Amino acid sequence: MRRFLRENALSLAFAALFLGALAFQALAGWKDFNETERMHGGEEVGLDRYVVSSHFGVAVLENWQSEWLQFTLFILLTVWLIQRGSPESKEPGREGTESERAQQLRGWAGPRAPEWARTGGLRTFVYANSLLLAMAAIWIASWFGQSVTGLAEYNDELEEHDLSAVSWLTYLGRPDFWERTLQNWQSEFLAVGTMVVFSIYLRQRGSPESKPVGAPHAATGVEG
């Protein structure tokens, strides 16, 4: 058990942080929701009902989808685009998907390489792009989830004002949906861009996301 905890400490730490933050978000959102209901003479709800409500669902998913979009675009763009001096970038001259030798594919795969890296054809293609495909699939699913929960919350507000509900396609064209979406997208793009540029000049000793402390600013990649 001790070895398992040590070898998986990073993922376990983030899992604990995620669950803790999600729990406290649920409590804070529940309190805020009930305060709003009291102000408008509405009916308060229990925590169990709140966590399955559209109010909580859209608050969670609008952030999830932007995070997965961030990773999807970062994985895709770093295949082709270079930022000289950043450890988040490949070295200049290595743009593109690289050779089979560099990627250890098919005949260049070692004896311990995953089977799908050696077989060729569709399976190797899928495996060679599996990280991007997985991130993109989760992003699309969470963005769809945001649109559905956002629609439910939006129609609840319309009903409170004796207005007709709108369809899913209509909601996708409403400012409410895009305001929720773009406020998260712009923050993610800013965060990633800042990390790419700051890591050229700034260091964090011991972090794999940073170049060695003594590496020159012009060095690209974590190897310095």
Image (cartoon, rainbow, N blue to C red):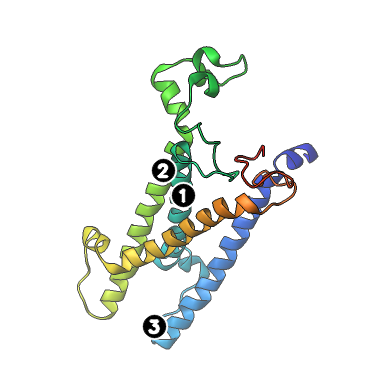
Give whichever of discs 2 and 3 has the lower sequence position: 3
Mark nearest the camera among 2 and 3 is 2
Q: For mark 1, does the 10 Å Cα neighbourhood hold few (<14), some (14 to 19), or many (20 or more) residues?
A: many
The percent position of residue 102, horizontal first and vertical second, equals 54, 23
Q: Are marks 3 and 1 in contact (CB under 8 Å)?
A: no
The percent position of residue 74, horizontal first and vertical second, equals 47, 45
Under circle 3, the secondary element is: loop
At a point 54% along the width and 41% down the height, the residue shown is 89
At a point 47% along the width and 79% down the height, the residue shown is 34
Q: For mark 2, does the 10 Å Cα neighbourhood hold few (<14), some (14 to 19), or many (20 or more) residues?
A: some
| Nearer to me, 146 or 93 | 93
| Nearer to me, 198 or 174 | 198
Q: Are marks 1 and 2 in contact (CB under 8 Å)?
A: yes
| Nearer to me, 212 or 163 | 212
Q: What residue sits right under mark 1 in the picture?
A: 68
At a point 64% along the width and 46% down the height, the residue shown is 209
Q: What residue sits right under mark 2 in the picture?
A: 136
The percent position of residue 188, horizontal first and vertical second, equals 48, 57
Left or right? Give the position of 69 relative to 88. left
Question: Which numbered marker is on residue 135?
Answer: none
Under circle 1, the secondary element is: helix
Q: CA distance from mark 1 to mark 2?
A: 7 Å
Q: Residue furthest top?
A: 107
Please state which amino acid type lies under the numbered disc 2: Ala
Q: Where, quadrant-wise, is the N terminus in this rendering?
A: top right
The percent position of residue 201, horizontal first and vertical second, equals 64, 53
Please state which amino acid type lies under the numbered disc 1: Trp
Q: What residue sits right under mark 3 in the picture?
A: 42
Q: For mark 3, does the 10 Å Cα neighbourhood hold few (<14), some (14 to 19), or many (20 or more) residues?
A: few
Q: CA distance from mark 3 to mark 1?
A: 35 Å
Q: CA distance from mark 2 to mark 3?
A: 39 Å
Left or right? Give the position of 57 relative to 10. left
